[in-house]
């Protein structure tokens, strides 16, 4: 198993880099995430939940609190996603149920200029691989909603299977959508290599 990513280390792919969030990144991320009243990225990333309101300072505190919640041997739960040195988003994980090692991953590409270019697929592949090699996980999951077909395709590219579909449980702009649960098992992931 890999050791926890050190603060100066990076996970590199062919076109993307994942790295720790630094103090200097906070204003950049804040601007990307909270760009305007209705940022375009939020229309695809769980728009049925309101974007948590933050000032720059409260966002900085939120990030520090996230880091402080990590266990001593736990990998960072959120990394910057860069392309050619430019921050375009983040990758994340969260515990659905930590005692049973039920972990879910996510990705946010906040700059629409980088949508549909394969950057998300590459970043999530690197991220999922890192998590399998770092933590004793049996499965990595991904939850999305039926309107976000791009995210479902990314999951499929990574070998994830639809494990559950909760019908018409999300409402957005007056229409009902399904919640989609996808996942990949460790043995399925390792066969890909």
Image (cartoon, grey):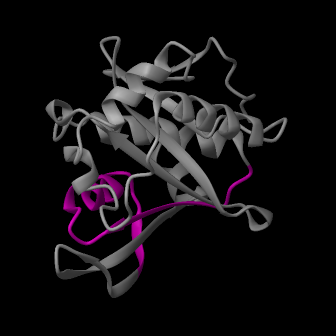
In the image, residue 154 lies in the stretch drawn in magenta? yes
Q: Is residue 69 above or below residue 47?
A: above
Q: Position of residue 82 (x, y in %)?
A: 37, 21
**Could you tell whether 57 is left or right of 161 in the image?**
right
Classify residue 87 by image quadrant.
top left
Q: Report the magenta residues as a range.
A: 136-164
Q: Position of residue 39 (x, y in %)?
A: 23, 44
Residue at point 85%, 35% (across, down): 72
Residue at point 35%, 11% (across, down): 85
Pick the quarter of the image with the N terminus.
top right
In the image, residue 163 lies in the stretch drawn in magenta? yes
Q: Is residue 7 above or below residue 165?
A: above
Q: Position of residue 158 (x, y in %)?
A: 38, 51
* Depth check, front residue: 157 or 24: 24
Residue at point 25%, 57% (across, down): 153
**Could you tell whether 110 is left or right of 139 in the image?**
left
Residue extending furthest right?
A: 72
* Depth check, front residue: 53 or 82: 53
* Depth check, front residue: 149 or 136: 149
Residue extending furthest bottom?
A: 167
**Could you tell whether 93 is left or right of 36 in the image?**
right
Q: How many marks?
A: 0
Q: Position of residue 104 (x, y in %)?
A: 55, 58
**Could you tell whether 180 is left or right of 70 in the image?**
left
Residue at point 43%, 47% (across, down): 53
Classify residue 23 by image quadrant.
top right
């Amino acid at each position: 198993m890999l050791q926890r990513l050190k603060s100066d280390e990076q996970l590199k792919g062919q076109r993307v880099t994942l790295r720790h969030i630094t103090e200097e990144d906070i204003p950049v991320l804040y601007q990307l995430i909270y760009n305007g009243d209705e940022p375009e990225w939020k229309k695809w990333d769980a728009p049925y939940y309101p974007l948590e309101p933050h000032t720059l300072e409260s966002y900085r505190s939120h990030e520090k609190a996230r880091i402080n919640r990590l266990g001593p041997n736990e990998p960072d739960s959120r990394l910057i996603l860069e392309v050619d040195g430019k921050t375009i988003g983040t990758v994340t994980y969260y515990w659905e149920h930590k005692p049973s090692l039920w972990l879910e991953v996510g990705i946010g590409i906040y700059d629409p200029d980088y949508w549909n270019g394969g950057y998300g697929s590459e970043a999530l592949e690197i991220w999922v691989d890192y998590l399998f090699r770092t933590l004793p996980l049996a499965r990595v999951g991904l939850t999305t909603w039926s309107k976000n077909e791009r995210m479902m395709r990314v999951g499929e590219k990574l070998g994830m299977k639809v494990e559950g579909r909760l019908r018409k449980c999300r409402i957005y702009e007056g229409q009902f959508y399904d919640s989609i649960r996808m996942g990949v098992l460790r043995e399925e992931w390792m066969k890909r290599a």
